[in-house]
Amino acid sequence: MQTTSIPPPSSRAVLRSYYCLCGDFVLVIQGKLDRLPQRQTDHAYIIRSQSGSDQPARKFKLNAEPGQKYLLRRKDGENYEMRQPFLCGRCKSTVAYQVTPPPPGSAPFLYVLKGAMTELQGRVPPDAFEGESDLDQESTI
């Protein structure tokens, strides 16, 4: 009698590596970034880093250094958000952020900036400079 073992869904998930635009490795995650939900405010990819009542946390490892936290004033001028950025270890570009102090994953969500990473090392993703004109409308304090 031959038995076939079917691996559980979590062991079948594909791990993807992502690189900063400078070529440095910054993220490994279960699944593709472009399939994750995005924030309406800045279109950053949302990684659920802590399990919620309706969804489990996503497995990931961010290889980035914490930067200087800052307060961001929204376009409407009335709303604010405290951000803890995470920077590429090589070029110091911001690649992700969360709304609580480090380490990455200590907040319910980690946000990966759209266009800050690429799956192909040494190649700039097509969305890397998308929305650059919108940067004037938000300011840091």
Image (spheres, grey):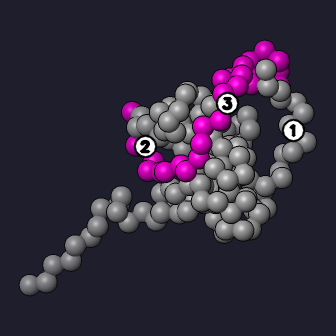
Determine whether 54 is above or below 70 in the image.
Answer: below
Within 10 angstroms of label 3, few (less than 14), some, or many (20 or more) residues?
few
Element under disc 1: helix
Q: Earlier in the sequence, mark 2 or mark 3?
A: 2
**Which residue lies most toward the top here?**
78
Instruction: Point out the image quarter for the C terminus.
Output: top right
Please tell me whether residue 58 belongs to the stretch shown in magenta.
Answer: yes
Q: Earlier in the sequence, mark 3 or mark 1?
A: 3
- Look at mark 2 in the image and give the residue it sits on: 57
Query: Which secondary structure is most common in the magenta stretch?
Result: loop
Query: How far apart in space, not on screen, are marks 3 and 1 (Cα)?
Result: 22 Å
Closer-to-camera residue (18/10)? 18
- Look at mark 1 in the image and give the residue it sits on: 134
Task: Give the extent of the magenta segment.
Answer: 53-82
What amino acid is found at the position of numbered circle 2 in the picture? Ala
Q: How many marks?
A: 3
What amino acid is found at the position of numbered circle 3 in the picture? Gln
What amino acid is found at the position of numbered circle 1 in the picture? Asp
